[in-house]
Amino acid sequence: MKSRLLGALVGALLLAAAAAPQAPASGPERRVFAVSVVDAYGNPVPGLTAANFLGEYRGQPVRILSAAEDLHPRRIVVLVDTSSSMQRGKAWSLAWTAAKDVVMALAPDNELVLMTVAEKVYGHAVFSRHSPAELSELVAQAEATAKTSGRANTALFDGMIKALHGFPPSGFADVLWVISDMADRSSLADGRDVELELARSHVRAYVTWLQSEEEWRRLRQGNLVRKRLAGASGGLSFDLKGDKPERNTALVGSLCDSIRRVYRVEVEFPRSIDKAREWELEVVGADGKKLKDVVVAYPRLLPLTEPAPRK
């Protein structure tokens, strides 16, 4: 008797489910991205339009609705790794020279904050409308303070996430510029956590990588991590060479130009973003062929939803 009643109940539930109205299929979704396009020397490529961009999501083409240069001021955090591994050899002087180059190039026209990270994150200076002499002095003061703070292991990933929490949720083309050997020893977070937080924050990671004097395997891991963080978030990265200061300064200058000159690209995806996935974007010429010797930096990792306001 009980089995017949149970069977009847299940049958009724199945009929009700079949008769119930079905949820509408997931429709298209529009998002806006900050995209940097640079040549082989890191210089921005101007004059592109929507016709120059082609994209794909889950095997289907996306619609490029618009693409135009955006030259508005940016919010930028420069995060310098000051842990024990950075205080060996030439890494320290290279890191602070790069930090000074970034500050001198970007501070006059953008909202820029200089921070350092070892076991904890420290804020040192907020730059706005300072003279070159004042900027140089503020960077020197931050370096001196960091140098006297003692040697410590790096919680780099934790520090990056903390720095990201300082960005307003409504920003466009904001940048977290990390100067580090990427040798994280004590973070609770890992590289994937930082990737997801970058995607949710809509902040691009620019990474200046200094090769430490540790074993080759860890160097290789650090190299892969910095490329992944920059690539997934729409930023750029490069390594510093101790014997080529002119190259370093030129590369920093080119990357600063790519922060100033950003394309605002509006994209319509064929379906809504149902999980954190990657997509593809490339630049083509008038003939529809992919341009050679051009790097397209765009947020490859799509967050599930738009970021909620930060608390």
Image: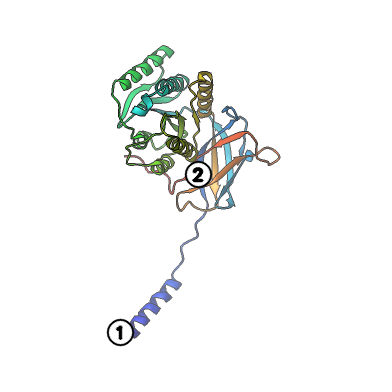
Classify residue 199 by image quadrant: top left
Where residue 285 appears, as percent x and y from the top left, is 67, 37
Q: Nearer the viewer, residue 157 or 2?
A: 157
Name the residue tied to disc 2: 31
Classify residue 218 by image quadrant: top left
Q: Nearer the viewer, residue 80 or 134?
A: 80
Considering the numbered disc 2 on the image, is that residue within a helix, a strand or a loop?
strand
Where residue 286 appears, as percent x and y from the top left, is 69, 38
Within 10 Å of disc 1 (Cα), the crowding (few <14, some 14-19, many 20+) is few
Residue at the image position 34 percent from the left and 81 percent from the top: 6
Q: Which image quarter holds the C terminus? A: top left
- Residue extending furthest toward the left: 149
- Residue extending furthest toward the top: 133
Q: Is residue 167 left or right of residue 251?
A: left
Where residue 162 appears, as percent x and y from the top left, is 34, 35
Name the residue tied to disc 1: 2
Look at discs 2 and 1 and give the one toward the viewer.
1
Mark 1 belongs to which amino acid? Answer: Lys
Residue at the image position 44 percent from the left and 46 percent from the top: 303
- Residue extending furthest toward the right: 287
| Marker disc for residue 176 | none
Classify residue 119 by image quadrant: top left
Residue at the image position 39 percent from the left and 38 percent from the top: 169
Mark 2 belongs to which amino acid? Answer: Arg
